[in-house]
Amino acid sequence: MRTGKKAATKSDKKGLERALGAPKAVRSSPKDRDLARNTKDAEGQFLTTNQGLRINDDQNSLKAGERGPSLLEDFHLREKITHFDHERIPERIVHARGSAAHGVFQVYESMARYTRAAFLNDPAARTPVFVRFSTVAGSRGSSDLARDVRGFAVKFYTSEGNFDLVGNNMPVFFIQDALKFPDLVHAVKPEPDREIPQAASAHDTFWDFISLMPESAHMIMWVMSDRAIPRSFRMMEGFGVHTFRLVNEAGESSFVKFHWKPLLGVHSILWDEAQKISGLDPDYHRRDLWEAIDSGAFPEWELGVQIVPEKDEHKFAFDLLDPTKLIPEEVVPVKRVGKLTLNRNPDNFFAETEQVAFHPGHLVSGIDFSNDPLLQGRLFSYTDTQLSRLGGPNFHEIPINRSVAPVHNNQRDGHMRQEINRGTASYQPNSVGGGCPFQAGRADGGFVSHAEKIDAHKVRGRSKSFFDHFSQAALFFKSQSDVEKEHLIQALRFELSKVERPEIRERMVRVLAQVDGGLAGRVAEGLGIAVPKAQNGPLNLSVPADGDAAAFQPEPVRKKILLSPALSMANKPLKGIQTRKVAVLAADGVSGSSLAAMTEALKAAGATPAVVSTRVGFLKTDTGKDIKIDASLLNTGSVLFDAVCVPGGKASVAALLAEPRAVRFVKEAYGHAKAIAATGEGMQLLSAAGALAASKAQAAAPAAGIVVGEIPKTKSVAEAFIAAIAAHRHWEREEKPPTPS
Ligand code: HDD
């Protein structure tokens, strides 16, 4: 702050850090980390104005006498308050609520056969990245737990310029043409008269729009599935959604779909939990990402590609350009080609997470667009939105948006220009600057658009190959496990029950009948309306376009539906208990040996145990040892944990039994199908919560995911408990409907 020189050095260091990628895990104590973070910029520095003048008193404004009026001359007061008055910028129109982290990407082996992109050609290259996750509909301050799509935007700072992969955690989208995006967003945002509801699609205008847009049927299956309520950003897949092109050195192009596969597995929570977490900790996902990175448990994803040779473009039952369709992984397998690791939290939320500007049009040589009409429309929108959000055309100069590849061009001036351009050559061609900067030929890495042949009539229309709106929606529903199907039905019942206009509910149920008669019937039942027969006839729902309704909204085309096991989270491999949170319920008198054996085993397996008690502070074990309490039953809840254990100890369990919140804690975890363990007297708490039969004989064969044993057996209880947590949930004991508490 004190001198320009210092600022330059700092930003150089930042660039270098980015270029080198991964700093080591920070493993110092939380207090040290806090101090290091908090003094980063200001250690040993005097407080100054923005002009560098040292401030002598920051507690009192300048007054005419101690009890007199403030003086306009107080430049420090005016500067400080003026800056404060302008501290907010417009939030993103969509994806306003987000969390981000720095990291690094490395390709496993050269993909030169398909693409000339340098960062995908060199397995030694560690490409710095910045990744922002987001919800779509809610405002900046809304809950992380909304039922919503999650944004998954990755900025690769490659040696050839920035490449942004601006995707979501779902592989398809609501609409086929970008022209409909403002309508979609207006429909889902809070209703314009009352600004209600916040961060929720459960209201009339959203379902009105959706029920009139059959092309959204497939996406609706995804958004009503548990994918819309992830356990963690770290445990969700990511998708580039559109079909893109890869282009190799010889100029040959293939189509590609991008995927991100999380190494922690793909997991979600229940809607009942989501609603409760929104109250207990609306920052749940943000906190989860921050804490994992801060503790050195760096989240990882593998980049996957589905590659389709250009000659196979028309071999599918759907159009590759249609963003409401996916390529089933069973048809074109996902090849894992590299790894993304997030290893550093941002230093400043505003400067980085808020000011980062993504754009699907930020490409590097070797990657190109397809003619997906949704993608084509996006190419306009993203720069345009930054102009108002970030205040002008120079947002690329904000540190988080800067390319690590040098930038040289003849763009000049504008609001908040940082670069001091020297010389007189600000045009091309020029002779006064020796012709610089030069255009780069292909051999010099110059971007050359793929020379796709296009010979067409100018039309405002849609290809008939986009008209099958239901086959893949049905494929998705049919490929879900029974538990997933049930959750999806409950989600639709919840959402549509919040819709006030009966005709919208009915229309939506008719749309669902096009997807699956059984699904529509179950939803209708929950809404107390007639169960529609599965319909194959035309829906005729849309607004006619100049009398051409048939072309705009044709009869549903039914294609052969296979099953796609890859669409079900139930078929994703389980990946251990790394970073899973386990509540250890205990009070004074807890068996110190059982508590220690349990927490050590959990930590050794990578989980994070936390002692939850009747109060905060410290508790005393049966042998008088002090144990720090991490949370109280008053300030936390079972929904914030993946599993619960109750170590024995007579006095401890008696205190927990006397505390209704402790009983509810276990009961709720049971209803949410979580792993639960108890040793010794701890079993009594499980029985009081209905998680374990009270009779000894029955308790000997507990329900799935319940692990109990005597105190000396804690080690073997812990082993079985760890295996039970790794299964994520034990759905066989989930009550129907699945939210019993
Ligand atoms: Fe978008 C932000 C993803 C369609 C217009 N979009 C935004 C972000 C993500 C996506 C992840 C947040 C980026 C960040 O973290 O800053 N958007 C998608 C996906 C889409 C999609 C996967 C479909 C496949 N978007 C889409 C369309 C339009 C937009 C069709 C407009 C025609 N999107 C925007 C935007 C945003 C945005 C208004 C808001 C803030 C921003 O761009 O920077 O321009």
Image (cartoon, grey):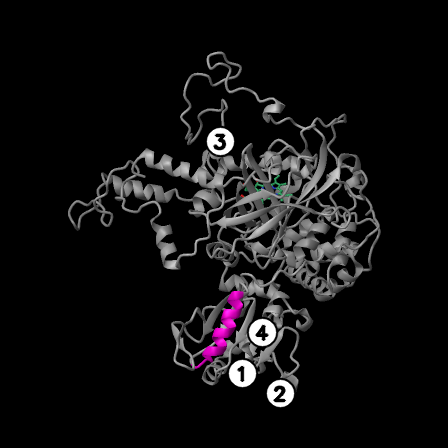
Residue furthest left in the image: 65
| Residues under numbered marks 1 and 3 in contact, where contact means CB atoms less than 8 Å apart | no
Q: Please check the rendered image and state whether residue 595 is part of the magenta-colored stretch, yes or no.
A: yes
Under tag 2, what secondary structure?
Answer: helix
Under tag 3, what secondary structure?
Answer: loop
Q: Position of residue 363 (x, y in %)?
A: 60, 34
Indicate whether 608 appears above or below 191. below
Under tag 1, what secondary structure?
Answer: loop
Q: Is residue 115 left or right of residue 396?
A: right
Residue drawn 52% across the image and 16% down it: 428
Quadrant in the rendering for residue 627: bottom left
Quadrant of the rendering where the C terminus is positioned: bottom right
In this orientation, does residue 615 appear? Answer: yes
Residue drawn 81% across the image and 53% down it: 562
Q: Amino acid at mark 3?
A: Pro
Under tag 4, what secondary structure?
Answer: strand
Q: Position of residue 303 (x, y in %)?
A: 63, 46
Residue drawn 71% across the image and 55% down it: 567
Nearer the observer: mark 1 or 4; the answer is 1
Q: Which residue is mark 1?
A: 680
Binning the other alpha carbons within 10 Å of mark 2 as few (below 14), some (14 to 19) or many (20 upward) gives few
- Could you give the CA–CA distance between mark 4 and mark 3, rounded to whole angstroms? 55 Å
Q: Is residue 397 left or right of residue 138?
A: left
Q: Which residue is mark 2?
A: 696
Q: Which residue is mark 3?
A: 393
**Numbered range of the magenta stretch:** 589-604
Q: Which residue is mark 4?
A: 676
Q: Amino acid at mark 2?
A: Lys
Residue closest to the eye, 296 or 81: 296
Mark with earlier residue (4, 2): 4
Q: Is residue 184 left or right of residue 403?
A: right
